[in-house]
Each structure stands twice: as structure tokens, then as C-alpha cells.
Amino acid sequence: MRILFMGTPDIARESLDNLYNEGFEICGVVTAPDKPAGRGMKIISSPVKEYAIKKNLKIFQPEKIVNNNEFKDEIRQLNPDLVCVVAYGVILPKSFLKIPPLGCINLHPSMLPNYRGPAPIQWAILNGDKKTGVTIMYLNEKMDAGDIIKQQEVEIEENETTGELWDKLSKIGSNLLVETVKNIDSGKIERTPQPEEFTLAPMLNKEMAKINWNEKNCYEIKNLVRGLNPIMGTYTHLKNKKIKFWKVQTLNKEEYLQISNGFEYLDFEKEDVRNSIVCK
């Protein structure tokens, strides 16, 4: 089977590595264009491109795919049997989806139809979910709406951050992708259409990072800190200084009084104290 792989971040690199090590023929790799990053605005390649260079795989970095007939012609010449997409970040047009005879499949890090969109791992943490998972599905022209092939549910630990859950789902998802590709190769697959009801996981924004102590309780603040770690972190201001939070802990009354060391101005019966967070 000839596979065209499409992806950009490290969660995609994990899947590409797994497919490569299983012996599948990777006829090409499509990833995002290089872009400047950091204080020095140094041009940075994606983790997927770096991996593809090491393995001497053919690399494509189109600025766009819609109406890019030259790029689509190049892909047709590769003659891929299957396209595997992991965190590529672009909705593929129908003209591209028709190229591989076995279709285009996608790894999505949620239990679809929950959390369609670009930030499913982050929103599962932000919302305090106890479980999430990974889904392998066929792509169609809508965002994360194609038929489901395989799913695997995963528990979210109480203090797990987005970064930690990202790493866990990368490994689980890459294994499920390989299993799915093997089943497609042998003709042993089932397709399950998604229901009409779904939830979204939209892009995060920098405004979310500022902690609103007045409107959020301690559990919501803890989930915010977990959900934005390590993407951007959360912050507050104290005496004109910006303080960043990467890890916090919620406390019961006894724990709170022990850590606060009996400060006289702390009254546990007040709502603002019961919903506060003690940070080391």
C-alpha cells in the first residue's frame, strides 16, 4: 500500500513514525510551510518535515490546496492508495479527496462527534472532562464530520495537563491508525456515520489566559491552568507584576487551614475563600 501522509505537529510525527516502522510505503509527506517563530523570528520547520528529511521522504509544503491544480497533479503522479491525515489543519476539497482509491482517513483526538475542530485536547481539559479518546474516520468536505472507522476511549487523570494528555493520545492514536490502515489493506473495515448532534472545540485565544478570580470557582480555574499548560499558561497581576501559573491544587478546609498557617484574615466560610486556590 502506498500512503501519502499529511500532518504538521509532533502528534502527527508520532503517527508517521509508526506507519514508517510498520513497513508501509510512504510515497510522500505533506506538511505546513516553514514559518518564523520565537523572539528571533527564526524560520522553523514542522516536526513532521524534520522527520521526513531524516527518512529521505518526498516533502510537499503547499500554501493552499483549494484551486492548487499543480499540487494536486503532483499528488496524482505519486499514485497513493490511501491518504492518512493527522493534525494537518486544513479542510481538504472534494477534488483532492477523490485522488486516492482507498480514500482519505484522519486521526482526531476526541470521541467524535464530541469536540470537532482544532483544539479537542485542550477543551476536554478546560471543561473538566473525565474521559476523552481518539477517532479514526474517513474525511469528507465538512470539518471532522466523516464516517467513523475506529475509536478508543481514554481516561483523563485529575491533574493531567493538555501537554500530558497530548503525549498520551499521540501514542494511542498512532497505534490505532496503524491498526486501521492494516484493516483497510485487508478489506476488513466498517463505517459508522456520525449523528447530527455534535460539539465544537474552537481555537484558543490569548484572552483566555487571564484568570478571572471573581467569576470562576477553584475547579474552573484549575481546569483553565491545566488546559493552557504548556500552550500559553495562565496569569494574573499582583502589585503591578504579572504572575504565571502552570500548576495549581484545590484544597479542602483542613488542607487550606494547614497551608495558610492560620492567617487571621482568612475566613473559610466566605465564598471567595472557599473558591480560592493556594499556589506554591
Image: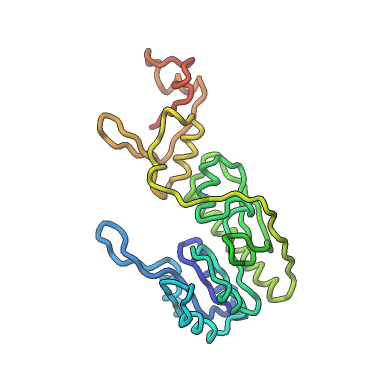
Q: Quadrant of the C terminus?
A: top left
Q: Residue furthest top?
A: 264
- In which quarter of the view is residue 157 placed? top right
Residue 275 image position (x, y, % from top left) = 48, 25
In the rendered view, tell whether residue 46 sits above or below residue 242.
below
Residue 269 image position (x, y, % from top left) = 49, 15
Q: Which residue lies furthest to the front in this view?
A: 67
Residue occupying image coordinates x 50% and y 80%? 72
Q: Quadrant of the N terminus?
A: bottom right
Residue 123 image position (x, y, % from top left) = 52, 46
- Which residue is nearer to you in this view: 275 or 250? 275
Residue occupying image coordinates x 41% and y 42%? 208
Residue occupying image coordinates x 44% and y 49%? 204
Residue occupying image coordinates x 46% and y 40%? 224
In the rendered view, tell whether residue 221 sits above or below residue 181.
above
In the rendered view, tell whether residue 277 sits above or below residue 106.
above
Residue 92 image position (x, y, % from top left) = 54, 69
- In which quarter of the view is residue 142 placed? bottom right
